[in-house]
Image (cartoon, helix red, strand yellow):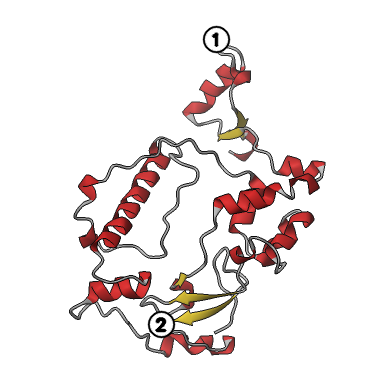
Amino acid sequence: MEYQSQSNRQSTAATTVQTGGPRKRKAEDLDSEEEEEVYDEVRLWEDGWKERYYKSKFEVDGNDIGFRRKVAWAYVEGLCWVLKYYYQGCASWDWYFPYHYAPFASDFDTVSQFVPDFSAPTEPFKPLEQLMAVFPAASKKHLPESWQNLMTDDDSPIIDFYPEDFQVDLNGKKYAWQGVALLPFVDEKRLLETLQTVYDKLDNFERERNSRGPDRIFVGPKHPFSKFLQQCYEGSGFVFSSCFFTAIFLYELF
């Protein structure tokens, strides 16, 4: 089935909806989608469901206990990353969950042996690098013109990051937007190495767009933190101008 998908990098690529096996339907047939019964190749209610799940979704031997453990540990590492992100700050700028599907809870039986390690130094992408990592080729107009051909030219070393066709696994759901978009994972090293070859084509405005600036804190005048920040800026014992963020007081909005 070819149609316009809803998600970030899916937004303009043609897709094939996959249920039990690949099948194609036309976009105008989408309205009848809810009336079609989705084939469930895992069949959780039948013996062998776990083996079928891993074989179908990960394309590995369903009895590979080591692989199951690897997926489960990566998932737990992701939970740790999220907790650290919200309570302590970003633990790693280059971490990602390297699978399209999650493990079963019953495969978490060895996670007590797992110790997450985010000690390696990392840094965030620059703004334009980030857009190159998440945009589909149809959104190239938001990128420097000198970079756009990397998303469309057949001889681009990263053309595989921007597929025109990809599968959406309904994964037991009814609608394509509920499915799993089987897009390739972007290789950070390859992306950044390729972008290094076109950095000299950026003009001054584009270089400014691609730079990281100070963080900004938006504070309403009625918030308790507002008075503290004002005192800092007014020089009551703090040298605030050297801090790496700017406070914006939104008096007119409150």
Image marks 1 and 2: residues in contact by CB distance under 8 Å:
no
Q: In which quarter of the image is residue 54?
A: bottom left
- Rendered view: 98 above or below 13: above
Q: Where's the N terminus, which quadrant?
A: bottom right
Horizontal arrangement in the rendering, residue 61 relative to residue 173 (left or right): left
Report how many numbered discs are placed on residues in the image.
2
Q: Identify the residue at image location x=48%, y=87%.
A: 23
Q: Is mark 1 on a helix, strand or loop?
A: loop
Q: Position of residue 145 (x, y in %)?
A: 78, 57
Q: In which quarter of the image is residue 20?
A: bottom left
Mark 1, other Cα within 10 Å: few <14 / some 14–19 / many ≥20: few
Of callouts 1 and 2, which one flags the residue occurring earlier in the amino acid sequence? Answer: 2
Identify the residue position indicated by label 1 in the image.
237
Q: Where's the C terminus, which quadrant?
A: top right
Q: What's the CA distance linking mark 1 and mark 2?
A: 65 Å
- Rendered view: 91 above or below 102: above
- Rendered view: 242 above or below 218: above
Q: Position of residue 197 (x, y in %)?
A: 72, 49
Identify the residue position indicated by label 2 in the image.
19
Q: Identify the residue at image location x=56%, y=30%.
A: 221
- Of circles 1 and 2, which is in front? 2
Q: Is mark 2 on a helix, strand or loop?
A: loop
Q: Identify the residue at image location x=23%, y=63%.
A: 65
Of 112 and 223, which appears nearest the observer?
Answer: 112
Q: What residue type is labelled 1?
A: Gly
Of 94 and 244, which appears nearest the observer?
Answer: 94
Horizontal arrangement in the rendering, residue 186 relative to residue 199 (left or right): left
